[in-house]
């Protein structure tokens, strides 16, 4: 009876607190993260240097910021594949503004507004017209990046102002980058939103049973629309960071990020079918992906081979609990 | 009833004819039969890939790993050909089918045996297979000068005035048509998409059928691997990067519902042709190829909007004979 899904829990906190703490997904992720950290520190003498650890954070901060909003979206049973294309479009618009002589505050505003606008566009298509989000966002993915290609062709925008470089290259204190601080603040905000507010409770309810949620007075369409806007907003913010870090815009910027963000979310224990997940898991998954890519980078493993490890990690981490349950004979 | 079932394909065919008409106002030679044959030949690979993806989407699953499978299998046959030029091409095609089948079976087993959602499995194997291509080749490319003339020439050879590549596409279309309309397996694939729970009660093994559709999409990915490499005469890790979304786009434009159970062989073929015509036409009517992405994106959104309307108005009917009786 493979296709009939088992009932899913909404809250972690109503389970027996003790057992769930030891046998939870997050615990598994912590073990994985510590293991990879240990392997890295033995594998390379350069790993435990504070500066190199600080470099490591850039591997996941930008994608992690989007992953928080994406986690909420996937918990509600939708998905957004257009996030990387939103980054490209927002970055292109910022580039155009630079050519017109815009200053740093205007650039940041443009990035955020374009991101929000694209997210709202996705949200309108999905909620107003009742379309499946996976297909809509494949469409808008081509559309947004397509517009960036039409504007830029094979050119690149450069010449961002000095003060703009801070967002992607600046440090708040010693080796703590601005991006990392932003990532941690966002983690707390999204954790609070998802696990401590009625809004978050409704997101879980929608993911578990949209029809039941609708009948119990949850405005399903409106909440989903807000979640698409949030995902767009985070992509816009990520676009500001990436553009600032690279100091240039090409239409192919952030190619393939959408799959990495979704990998991060799923690795973090968010059910792709909706209705289950936690922000803590996503934070851990972001760390793990950052550790893996950085650690292998120190060992001079090419990026494409790293993706094998990420892919294997994804499948193994998802498969482990299932195999574990099978072995114990429980269904 | 019959009219409704043909409905989407008729509209899409009409849209394609209008599109060709519009293009020929700017560039009259585009509508020549010879040129249209060329467009068909150009789109052959996308057509067969869309058919492989179609059977997966019909069962409410998705295969994101097809382009990576194509890349890996293409590298395998290219390296075999470079090392042993004596291996005849039909044998290489069988090898390509077998390698593709193996990769597809891995997806299928994970979906069937462990019940992992297909989007997660194929997201993982998408990166794994492409990474494996790098490991296999050591990052090296296989260029045209390392490939044997037969390897490159096979699909270009004309049979009855039509390239072999087009014949392969026609053969695959015919096979899929028979599979979907004349076999129990085709019927179960539709049934699973329409109602998996009811399918279980009617005695269809849902898990095993899903395993079979992933094997089919894997084999198609493998076949496309050989065709792609011998067409563009370069095998590298970058081959067909990001192409998985084009395949899905062709299916969506062809009216195959992502919610499963709705779609036809004709739709998938026409959806692929629609994209193929656009990419072939842009250069000849002096529009920058940079417009292509935005155009296909708009086409996808439009197709989804139109198809959703059709789905809401009409229930899903697969037993049309029973309906009519």
Image (cartoon, coloured by chain):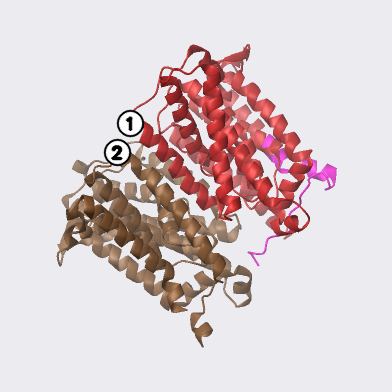
Residue B303 appears anywhere in the view: yes
Mark 1, chain letter? A
Question: Residue at the front extreme?
Answer: B25
Q: Is residue A140 above or below residue B7?
A: above
Q: Chain B's shade in the image?
A: brown
Q: Is residue A293 left or right of residue B27?
A: right
Reading the image, the residue beneath label 1 is: A154
Foreground pick, A313 / B86: A313
Horizontal and vertical percent position of residue B301: 47, 52
Question: Residue at the bottom extreme?
Answer: B325
User: Which stretch did the figure color magenta?
Assistant: A1-30
Residue lying at 71% horizontally and 36% vertically, measured from the top left: A280
Residue B121 appears anywhere in the view: no
Q: Is residue A221 above or below residue B141?
A: below
Reading the image, the residue beneath label 2 is: B141
Q: Quadrant of residue B47?
A: bottom left
- State the predominant SS element of the stretch in magenta: loop
Q: Quadrant of residue B112?
A: bottom right
Q: Chain A's shade in the image?
A: red
Specify the quadrant that holds the C terminus of chain A: bottom right
Q: Secondary structure at mark 1?
A: loop
Foreground pick, A114 / A58: A114
Horizontal and vertical percent position of residue A318: 62, 48
Q: Is residue A199 above or below residue B257?
A: above
For the residue carrying disc 1, how many other residues have a C-alpha within 10 Å: few (<14), some (14-19), or many (20+)? Answer: few
For the residue carrying disc 2, how many other residues have a C-alpha within 10 Å: few (<14), some (14-19), or many (20+)? Answer: some
């Amino acid at each position: 009876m493979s296709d009939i899904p088992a009932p899913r829990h909404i809250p972690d906190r109503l389970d027996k607190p003790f057992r769930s703490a030891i046998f939870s997904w997050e615990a598994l992720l912590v073990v994985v993260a510590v293991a990879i950290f240990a392997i890295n520190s033995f594998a390379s003498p350069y790993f435990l240097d504070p500066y190199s650890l600080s470099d490591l954070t850039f591997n996941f901060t930008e994608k992690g910021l989007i992953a928080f909003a994406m986690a909420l979206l996937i918990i509600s049973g939708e998905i957004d594949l257009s996030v990387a294309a939103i980054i490209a479009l927002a970055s292109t618009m910022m580039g155009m503004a630079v050519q017109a002589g815009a200053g740093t505050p205007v650039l940041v505003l443009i990035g955020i507004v374009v991101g929000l606008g694209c997210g709202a566009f996705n949200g309108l298509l999905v909620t107003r017209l009742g379309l499946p989000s996976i297909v809509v966002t494949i469409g808008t993915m081509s559309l947004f990046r397509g517009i960036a290609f039409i504007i830029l062709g094979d050119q690149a925008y450069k010449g961002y102002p000095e003060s703009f470089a801070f967002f992607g290259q600046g440090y708040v204190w010693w080796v703590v980058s601005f991006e990392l601080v932003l990532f941690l603040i966002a983690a707390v905000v999204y954790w609070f939103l998802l696990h401590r507010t009625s809004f978050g409770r409704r997101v879980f309810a929608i993911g578990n049973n949209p029809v039941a949620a609708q009948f119990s007075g949850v405005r399903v369409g409106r909440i989903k629309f807000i979640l698409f806007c949030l995902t767009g907003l985070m992509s816009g913010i990520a676009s500001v960071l990436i553009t600032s870090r690279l100091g240039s815009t090409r239409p192919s910027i952030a190619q393939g990020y959408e799959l990495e963000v979704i990998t991060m979310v799923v690795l973090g224990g968010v059910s792709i079918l909706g209705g289950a997940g936690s922000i803590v898991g996503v934070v851990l998954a972001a760390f793990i992906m950052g550790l893996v890519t950085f650690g292998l980078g120190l060992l001079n493993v090419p990026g494409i081979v790293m993706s094998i490890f990420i892919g294997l990690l994804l499948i193994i981490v998802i498969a482990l609990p299932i195999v574990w349950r099978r072995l114990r004979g429980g269904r | 009833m019959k009219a409704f079932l043909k409905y989407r394909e008729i509209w899409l065919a009409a849209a394609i004819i209008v599109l060709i008409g519009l293009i020929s106002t700017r560039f009259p030679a585009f509508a020549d039969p010879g040129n249209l044959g060329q467009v068909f030949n150009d789109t052959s690979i996308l057509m067969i890939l869309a058919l492989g993806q179609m059977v997966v989407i019909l069962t409410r699953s998705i295969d994101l790993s097809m382009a990576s499978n194509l890349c890996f299998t293409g590298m395998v046959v290219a390296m075999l050909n470079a090392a042993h030029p004596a291996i005849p091409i039909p044998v290489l095609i069988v090898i390509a089918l077998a390698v593709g089948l193996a990769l597809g079976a891995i997806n299928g087993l994970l979906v069937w045996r462990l019940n992992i959602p297909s989007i997660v499995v194929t997201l993982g194997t998408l990166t794994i297979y492409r990474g494996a291509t790098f490991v296999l080749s050591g990052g090296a490319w296989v260029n045209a000068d390392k490939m044997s003339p037969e390897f490159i020439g096979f699909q270009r050879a004309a049979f009855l005035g039509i390239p072999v590549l087009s014949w392969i596409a026609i053969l695959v279309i015919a096979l899929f048509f028979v599979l979907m309309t004349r076999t129990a397996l085709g019927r179960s694939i539709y049934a699973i998409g329409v109602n998996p729970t009811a399918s279980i009660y009617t005695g269809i093994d849902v898990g095993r059928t899903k395993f079979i559709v992933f094997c089919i999409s894997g084999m198609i990915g493998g076949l496309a691997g050989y065709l792609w490499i011998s067409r563009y005469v370069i095998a590298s890790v970058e081959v067909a990067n990001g192409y998985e979304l084009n395949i899905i786009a062709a299916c969506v434009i062809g009216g195959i519902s992502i919610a499963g159970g709705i779609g036809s062989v004709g739709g998938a073929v026409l959806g692929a042709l629609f994209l193929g015509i656009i990419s072939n036409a842009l250069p000849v009517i002096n529009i920058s190829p940079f417009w292509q992405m935005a155009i296909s994106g708009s086409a996808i959104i439009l197709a989804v909007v139109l198809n959703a309307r059709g789905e809401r108005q009409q229930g899903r009917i697969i037993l049309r004979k029973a309906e009519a009786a």
